[in-house]
Image (tube, helix red, strand yellow):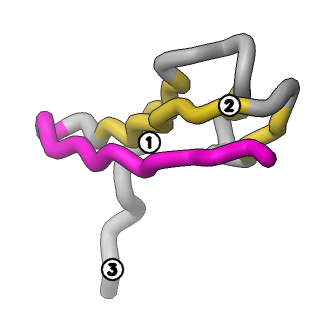
Amino acid sequence: KLKKHRKTAFESDNQDVAVVSKKGVITAKKKGKCSVYVYAQNGVYKRVKVTVK
């Protein structure tokens, strides 16, 4: 039996270029580059580079 995973958090480092919802859906706002970070409750995180054309 698998235990339910804890929630993750999402954050964009440039809200003018792209925003990310609580569920991790990225929405582009204008042209440019930014990074979206995904954080787990155990301290592990991952950066995703986003380019809006």
Other residues around mark 1 within 10 Å, as few (<14) / some (14–19) / many (≥20): few
Q: Is residue 39 above or below residue 5?
A: above
The residue that disc 2 covers is: 32
Q: In this picture, which residue range is highlighted in magenta?
A: 42-53
Earlier sequence position, callout 3 versus callout 2: 3
Q: Which of marks 3 and 1 is in front?
A: 1
Q: Which of 1 and 48 is in front in this view?
A: 48
The residue that disc 3 covers is: 2
Tell me residue 30's x, y (percent): 85, 26
Residue at image point 46% right, 48% down: 49
Decide whether residue 38 is among the magenta residues: no
Residue at image point 80% right, 47% down: 53
Cα separation between marks 3 and 2: 40 Å
For the residue labelled by badge 1, is the local secondary structure a helix, a strand or a loop? loop
Tag 1: residue type?
Lys
Cα separation between marks 3 and 1: 15 Å
Q: How many labels does the image show?
A: 3
